[in-house]
Image: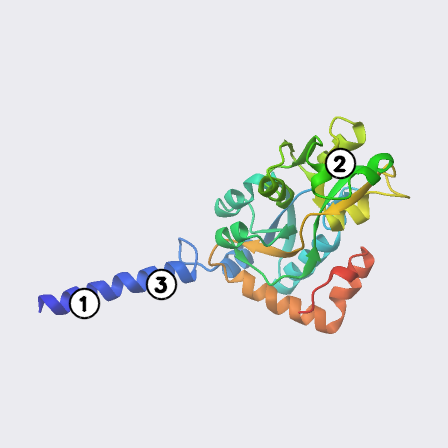
Amino acid sequence: MKTIMKRIALLLVFAMAACIFAGCGNKDGVSDAAYVKDKGTLVVGITDFAPMDYLENGKWIGFDADMAEAFAASLGVKAEFVEIVWETKTMELNDKNIDCVWNGMTLTDAVKNAMETSNAYCNNAQVVVVKREVAAQYDSVDSIRDLRFVVEAGSAGAEELDALGIPYIEADSQADALMEVAAGTSDACVIDLLMAGAMIGEGTSYAELTYTVALNSEEYGVGFRKGSDLAAKLNEFFAAAYKDGSMLEIAEKYGVQASLIAQ
């Protein structure tokens, strides 16, 4: 009898562990999708990051912002955007201050271990940005090692410089890092290629800047709380939006169509 009871107890322990790791729901037993529908909002964690999320006339727009609004509508709720400190994104998720991170987020191993992530939806790279007048001097990894770098804290760019052993100072956002380089307080920054394409060069606010070395290639995804059922729902939404052309239409609006990944 004792042996049978021990076996039952072990089975219960294993079942509970499986439930936790499979993300059976939140601590109160309610799934993320049900939680979001009940409160009527999908709270989206973002930073100022054109062309993915940025303010225009007091409204957050961009490829990610528009897609987030469309996804929220498909759930029967409204999207609410909250600007976060990028380095604290996982904590913001787990504390339920936000429901997802949807901001050109690179699918690194650290991100995938900390969050439930969607399928990749955009290709990207981390690129070195310098002043145009000196760009010809910095066309390889070896040539950039002595530059004074600034990068967004906790970003994929910071990870790339860490891997190369190149020191840097931290900024709150990629936009702040760009301003430092433009002002001359730093020699270079590392930002996302999609942002570089939208924010620097001829006809932009940073015409005096350009990008040179690409440090990697990567993919963007959306992050939810570990075990959240919203990731699977977003994958279904991505597939439908890609098939009906609405995803491409939004991508073309913000000039990121060449980076789209087929769903």
Given contact means CB atoms under 8 Å apart, are the residues at marks 1 and 3 in contact? no
The residue sitting at the top extreme is 185
Q: Estimate the spatial distance between the alpha carbons at disc 1 and disc 2, rounded to whole Å.
A: 60 Å
For label 1, count other residues whose C-alpha is less than 10 Å away and answer few (under 14), some (14-19) or many (20+). few
The residue sitting at the left extreme is 1
Q: Estimate the spatial distance between the alpha carbons at disc 3 and disc 2, rounded to whole Å.
A: 45 Å
The residue sitting at the front extreme is 142
Q: Is residue 129 left or right of residue 98?
A: right
* Mark 1 or 2, closer to the camera: 2
Q: Is residue 169 left or right of residue 197?
A: left
Task: For residue 111, say whether it is visible.
Answer: yes
The x, y position of residue 69, in whole percent, is 69, 56
Task: Identify residue for label 3.
Answer: 18
Task: Identify residue for label 1.
Answer: 7
Q: Estimate the spatial distance between the alpha carbons at disc 1 and disc 3, rounded to whole Å.
A: 16 Å
Residue type highlighted by circle 2: Leu
On-image quarter of the C terminus: bottom right
Residue at the (64%, 65%) spot, across then down = 74
Given contact means CB atoms under 8 Å apart, are the residues at marks 1 and 2 in contact? no
Please tell me which of labels 3 and 2 falls first in the chain: 3
- Name the one closer to the observer, 46 or 40: 46
Task: Identify residue for label 2.
Answer: 178
Q: Secondary structure at mark 3?
A: helix
